[in-house]
Amino acid sequence: MRLVTYRERDGGADHLGLVLGERVVNLAAAAKALALPDCHDDMAAFIRAGEPALACARAIAARLAGDSAAGVALGDVQLLAPIPRPARNVVCVGLNYREHVAESKSVQGDAPPPAYPVFFTKPPSCVIGPGAAIPWHGHVSEAIDWEVELAVVIGREGRDIAEPDALSHVFGYTVGNDITARDLQQRHGQWYKGKSLDGFLPLGPAIVTADEISDPQALDLCLRVNGAEKQRSNTSLMIFGVARLIAEWSAGMTLFPGDVLMTGTPSGVGMGRTPPEWLRPGDVVEAEIPAIGVLRNAVEAP
Ligand code: ZN
């Protein structure tokens, strides 16, 4: 299933939606209309509810599958980030593709690929949705870069999760763009500041549930700036796969439903280019994982 958080164009409330073709169905309203148990109207609550909520959504999908008038056209709603404001910091992994390690010398020096995942975080205030403007922070940074990544949404609480069991804790997958101010990343040593400016984490457009992604290590991913391709790779090239990342992250640390993990970016970022390339006001960035969708954001024009 493909799940979204959306707002009706006339500025109504935010809803949890199920995407059926080119339409989006309000899950809570559909559950009521079909006399099914409450499906929740909020992504975080839906994820916490676990299997009963998924079963309700599957029943709605089955009942409405052939109904071309169900819900509203996707083009008539505003998509928000699937989890508009995560409850905790988003956990990220740096240097998780070998070719990206090689192109990162200007910031990281000549270090070998890491032996263990390099974890850092971005605060919930970074998250913006598909179509939202990436704020322009030109007074703070002159070196704003892009990073397409597979984002993993945790579905089931756990600690000390063993690698073979790790994917059973995944609710689903979405696309993330780990926007980074390279000058701040370098200046402050620790990555938190350069990665955490407001609007620096576009997420979306949808969460595809884990049952539809049989192998998270076989996904193409790419990124375009103003239509020109900058990144193209496959998640098979991660140094640490999703299961290993979850095992390492959860060691001695409880993961909760709705937690989000960014799994690192492949090569092709602006910092690795000669000369380096940075985002400018008005640029349009498209981060894509074809199995999930295209996450399109323009940089705010001041
Ligand atoms: Zn990243």
Image (cartoon, rainbow, N blue to C red):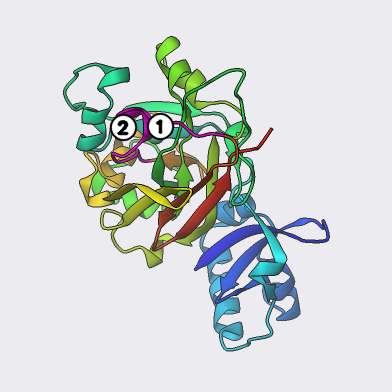
User: Which quadrant of the figure has residue 273?
Assistant: top left
Name the residue at 26% across, 41% down: 244
Residue 279 belongs to the span the image colors magenta: yes
Name the residue at 53% across, 74% down: 58
- The x, y position of residue 85, in whole percent, is 63, 40
Q: Circle 1 — which element? A: loop
Name the residue at 44% across, 37% down: 146
| Res. 273 mark | 2
- Seen from the viewer's position, the closer of residues 56 and 197 is 197
Exactly how many numbered labels are in the figure? 2
| Res. 277 mark | 1
Vertical arrangement, residue 48 with respect to residue 113, above or below? below
Relative to 70, 91 lies left or right: left
Ligand 1 shows up in which quadrant of the image? top left
Which quadrant does the C terminus fall into? Answer: top right
- The x, y position of residue 96, in whole percent, is 27, 35
- Determine whether label 2 and label 1 are within 8 Å by CB: yes
- The x, y position of residue 159, in whole percent, is 39, 37
Q: Magenta segment, which residues? A: 263-280
Mark 2 belongs to which amino acid?
Answer: Arg
Taken as a whole, is the magenta stretch helix, strand or loop? loop
Vertical arrangement, residue 102 with respect to residue 53, above or below? above
Name the residue at 36% across, 33% down: 93
Q: Is residue 156 at least partly visible in the picture?
A: no
Q: Is mark 2 within 8 Å of ligand 1?
A: no
Q: Is residue 194 at least partly visible in the picture?
A: yes
